[in-house]
Amino acid sequence: DSGVTQTPKHLITATGQRVTLRCSPRSGDLSVYWYQQSLDQGLQFLIQYYNGEERAKGNILERFSAQQFPDLHSELNLSSLELGDSALYFCASSVEYPPDTQYFGPGTRLTVL
Amino acid sequence: GENVEQHPSTLSVQEGDSAVIKCTYSDSASNYFPWYKQELGKRPQLIIDIRSNVGEKKDQRIAVTLNKTAKHFSLHITETQPEDSAVYFCAATRGNTPLVFGKGTRLSVIA
């Protein structure tokens, strides 16, 4: 157990819908990262938050957004869902600096039908 | 930005043999290089990491080497076991930027 939690574990929804994925970082970690992993694909970085502020953006679609709350948990919002959004979504947390280990949560498997 | 290339994409070895996975990076300012192991449907788990001030690091059957001049680093697994079968990802960062991952290597250890 990495100490990073994610809910829900599985999510099945229809095209055009909107979903929210939730992540709680390890105690003491200020940075949260979101990644998307499609079938047999690598880890695509979406977005990073540090202590409530957006720190870095990767290949995140405009239909996707995220935020980090004062208690440091983070939510990833996916809207106008398409079939191609079906994937595993991981969040990870770290102390960020100096460069340190990113610990991954168990992931949320999103299936869009 | 950083770009990480990882080879090979698939690797099959006999149980007890060694496995080597290689990664190259493009940003000479990168200074932290972790390796993650991901079993099917599970989270990526850190297995070993190395910082730019170190050339080699070992942890039991796993070792990582770093060549800063050539900008490449490698994962070495000795005495492979069936439970080593998984996808392995390398990554790199300069510390104030997110990790950039390689595309992964699917390792199969044949008993």
Image (cartoon, coloured by chain):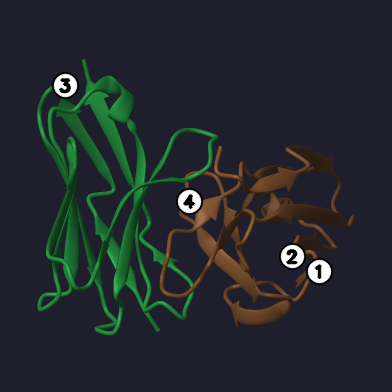
Alpha-carbon neighbours of circle 3 within 10 Å: few (<14), some, or many (≥20)?
some
- In the rendered image of the structure, the colour used to display chain B is green
Identity, as a three-letter code, of the amino acid under mark 2: Leu
Locate residue A27, reporting x and y percent: 64, 55
Which one is in front, B80 or B10?
B80
Q: Amino acid at mark 1?
A: Phe
Q: Position of residue B19 (x, y in %)?
A: 15, 39
From the top left corner, tell me how far across and down residue B101 is, in percent: 40, 62
The answer to whether dots 3 and 4 both sit on one chain is no
Q: Are marks 4 and 2 on the same chain?
A: yes
Q: Amino acid at mark 3?
A: Glu
Chain of the residue under label 4 = A
- In the rendered image, the residue lying farthest to the front is A28
Is A8 placed left or right of B51 in the picture?
A: right
Secondary-structure class at tag 2? loop
* Residue bearing the label numbered 1: A69
